[in-house]
């Protein structure tokens, strides 16, 4: 058996045990690994070792979404005022 077929069979068994579809299991795994990657990047962001542009490129998300994640996790960041002051 190849590694992928082993993974597929394990996924199918887990889905049957939990009364979920395979797609729901994959979505949960996707959310888990995305959050794991976000947390790793946030640690580097807090230390000042990685910039927002590099993180958003790595995670394939928009800067607006990244700032929303920062707000959600109560991480301080610089806020820019977009209104033009005359």
Image: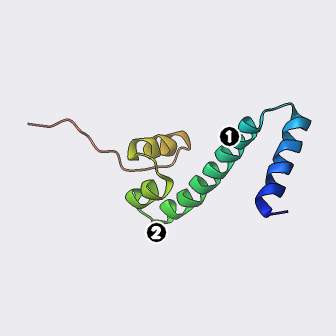
Q: Residue furthest top?
A: 19
Location of residue 49 in the rendering, given as x and y in whole percent from the top left corner: 46, 69
Image location of residue 44, percent across then percent down: 52, 64
The mark closer to the camera, 2 or 1, is 1
Task: Please say if the residues under marks 2 and 1 sit with CB atoms less than 8 Å apart.
Answer: no
The quarter holding residue 1 reads bottom right
Q: In the image, 33: left or right of 6?
A: left
For the C terminus, the image quarter is top left
**Occupied quadrant, residue 27:** top right
Secondary structure found at label 1: helix
**x, y (%) of residue 76?**
46, 49
User: Which residue is labeled 2 in the image?
Assistant: 49
Q: Where's residue 69, x and y in %?
A: 51, 43
Looking at this rendering, what residue extends furthest in the bottom direction? 49
Disc 1 marks which residue?
27
Q: Residue at x 71, y 46 (%)?
A: 29
Is residue 24 placed above or below 76 in the rendered structure?
A: above
Q: Residue at x 86, y 50 (%)?
A: 10
Residue at 40%, 56% in the rendered image: 52
- Judged from the image, the secondary structure of the residue bearing numbered disc 2 is loop
* 31 left or right, relative to 68: right
Whether 82 is drawn above or below 44: the answer is: above
The image quadrant of residue 51 is bottom left
Q: Is residue 9 left or right of residue 86?
A: right
| Badge 1 density bin: few <14, some 14–19, many ≥20, Cα 10 Å | few
Query: Within 10 Å of the Cα at label 2, are there few (<14), some (14-19), or many (20+) other Cα atoms?
Result: few
Residue at screen point 84% across, 38% down: 15
Residue reaching furthest left?
86
């Amino acid at each position: 058996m190849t590694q992928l077929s082993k993974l597929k069979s394990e996924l199918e068994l887990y889905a049957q045990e939990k009364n979920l579809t395979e797609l729901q299991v994959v979505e949960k795994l996707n959310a888990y690994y995305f959050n794991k990657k976000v947390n790793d990047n946030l640690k580097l962001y807090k230390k000042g070792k990685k910039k927002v542009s590099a993180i958003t490129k790595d995670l394939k998300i928009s800067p607006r979404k990244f700032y929303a994640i920062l707000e959600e996790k109560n991480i301080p960041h610089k806020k820019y005022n977009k209104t033009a002051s005359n």
